[in-house]
Image (tube, helix red, strand yellow):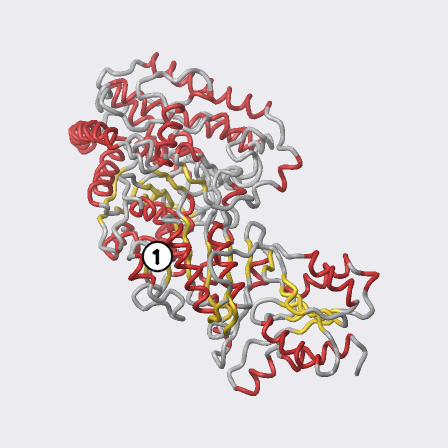
Amino acid sequence: MAVMSYRDALTQALREELSRDERVFLMGEEVAQYNGAYKVSKGLLDEFGPMRVVDTPITELGFAGIGVGSAMVGLRPIIEFMTWNFALLALDQVVNAAAKMLYMSGGQFPMPMVFRGPNGSALQLSAQHSQAWESWLAHIPGLKVLTPGTPADAKGLLKSAIRDDNPVVFLEGEMLYNTKGEVPDGEYTIPIGKAELKREGGDCSIIAHGKMILVAMQVADALAKENIAVDVVDLRTVRPMDVEAISVSVRKTNRAVVLEEGWEICGIGAQVVDFIQRECFDDLDAPVIRVHQADVPMPYAKNLEKAAKPDAAKAVAAIRKVMYLD
Amino acid sequence: MRDTLKRGEPRSTDSEAAANADKATADKANADKANADKANADKANADKANADKANADKANADKAPAIGNNAAVSGDNAAAIADSGPAASADGAAFRKELLRSMLLQRRFEERCAEAYALGKIGGFCHLYIGQEAISAGTMSVLRPDDYVVTAYRDHGQAIARGMSPRTVMAELFGRRDGSSGGKGGSMHLFDKGLNFLGGHGIVGAHIPLAAGVSWAIKYRKGDQICVCFFGEAAVNIGSFHEALNMASLWKLPAIFIIENNRYGMGTEISRATANEDVTIRAAAYNMAGESVDAQDVFAVRDVVGRAVELARREQKPTLLEMRTYRFMGHSMSDAASGTYRSREELEENMKRDPIVVLHDRMRGDDQLSDGEFSRLDDEQKAICQDAWDFADASPEPAQEELYTHVLVDTTS
């Protein structure tokens, strides 16, 4: 296995899939000549040319719609949003067009396309550039929503997303692009809808996805020093959600903390907790606790930003609480 | 419902209209010859690389009899007016009769929809096309079967003009199993993949980028099809219109953007919504050709769309067209045709320019259609609509398990 960055893993996935299927093309702002705002598409213009790697004007609604139209007639667009914050302008195409076309047409028009880009907060980008959108998108029937947290998952899931005949929302972690990890050599894909147990431990389950996997692993490391063994369940896909994997873990540990980057109300964690109370009611030894962003727009000041974000310390405190250690 | 077709005494066309008519005939003859030549060339090209196109052609060949065929009295056999081909003469009686037939079928179909809505057989929103039929009939008559059509929610007329079966359309409106979307789409979401009829979209203006995307796919595959997109004049103020037109022109996409200017966005008159009522001026902002036409005259529609088709097919350049028309009904079934946001006098004045009457008058003037033949043709369309009604009425509701089908497909490629 090679060690590579999350960014390079994504680039590899794009390159392999562009090579594999000539119906696949990448479209978005600065993806071609500029090599991508986050350099995920670096080198692809030179390799595949301007019809396969396409720079657009700043017009999210428009080029998302171009993707939808081209998918209706059999192309397989990958629509890159420079960040998901800008994708709000295009949500009508994601939600009202891509997600519903198959149903409205009685099965006539599948939507084999991917909407992808960085999601969640970075550092001091303040309110409009620091948001995690997965709970909005996961709410919509007709979409699949993927949130890879490691380079290996990023590559394998992006390849699966591109090959899927449904509209797939692919949320990359803005703070993950430079993180490194082992990536299998050669051709591989990761099935959509399957969680992975990233760390095994019997004392408490921590259920997370996307960027929060990094935090969850830090938490597991820290608690290991206190002889507390944590099960880290990486959802990887938040729609469809792997309820079985959550249940197996919680039945084993009898305690759970759900960690997410987004806000509390109607968040992904709320859905996880609902599955837990339905599937594991008699297995629980403590109420499930959620860790999430403070219920405020993201502030700019460093100290306030830190206070707003979920982090390892907050997650450790939550685990100690469900274990009645404090 | 009442017959919306008012056939008063024959109205002699004024001199301007007559001059237009002559010009239209001449242009049309040329256009048709060009079409015929091109059709042959296209056949030779036969686009092996494009399996979709081949399938679409086949589907169309099955569904759409050539122009001049009399439609059988069955909702399942309604002919599309597409690709007139070498046999049809543009100013010939048979071809004109075919255009008239299409418009009459749309009119009678919509009248039955109003009736079905009043009886509760059709629910939800239902937007009728009455008064605007020359736009669909004229446009479809210059398209090839492998071209694409995308439209908004006032879509029954266009669907039928493109060749969708009145039976499956009516069954869809009734929410039945045999509807074009199995009863899952309804009035605003008519689709027919075999006819390259890509909906039927309910959000104002949101489908305009889709048409640009279809055109992008055509260019991507180096095809010579075009994509036509219909929308109302109120959509020219929404962002998706501008975003789509900009990219269509920037990237030289074979698209035709057709504004159906019936002067009212729901209940808001264009003068209350649009700073410059000359909507085709928007084309200049995108370095795009733009034309405006009296769309109650089906030949004027054919002419202007024909030119846009040539530009799109030959040079991959988009065009913005304004079709000046008027809807004779309310915005949907929930508002009165007049008396609230527009006066009865205005409505009646505009109904004098009924596109069906305009064409009928011309044919009568040219001794191409007797009143008896007109009545017979009209009766045939009414029978097709009755058949569609009966078919829809007899079709079962969708099975309960259909609730959860077509949310996702379980395939990968």
Between residues B281 and B413, which one lies in front from this camera angle?
B413
Relative side of B233 to A121, left or right: left
Relative side of B153 to B253, left or right: right
Relative side of B220 to A61, left or right: left
Residue A209 versus residue B127 in the image, above or below: below
Residue B247 visible here: yes
Q: State how many labels appear.
A: 1
Q: Residue at x 33, y 58 (%)?
A: A53
On the image, numbered disc 1 is attached to which residue? B243
Measuring from the top left, give residue B142's x and y in whole percent.
27, 32
Measuring from the top left, give residue A317's x and y in whole percent.
71, 80
Q: Identify the image quadrant of residue A145.
A: bottom right
Seen as rendered, the residue at the extreme top is B372
Q: Identify the image quadrant of residue A273.
A: bottom right
Q: Which residue is drawn at 53% across and 32% down?
A: B172
Residue B192 versus residue A193 in the image, above or below: above
Residue A68 versus residue A82 in the image, above or below: above
Measuring from the top left, give residue B389's x and y in whole percent.
53, 24
Q: Which amino acid type is marked by label 1?
A: Glu
Pointer 1 local density, CA inside 10 Å: few below 14, some 14–19, many at least 20: many
Q: Kindly state the secondary structure of the residue where label 1 is placed.
A: helix
Residue A16 versus residue A69 in the image, above or below: below
Measuring from the top left, give residue A178's x and y in whole percent.
47, 75
Q: Identify the image quadrant of residue A230.
A: bottom right
Residue A266 visible here: no
Give me the chain letter of mark 1: B
Q: Which residue is drawn at 74% across and 61% down?
A: A276
Q: Which residue is drawn at 47% across and 28% down?
A: B111
Between residues B7 and B143, which one lies in front from this camera angle?
B143
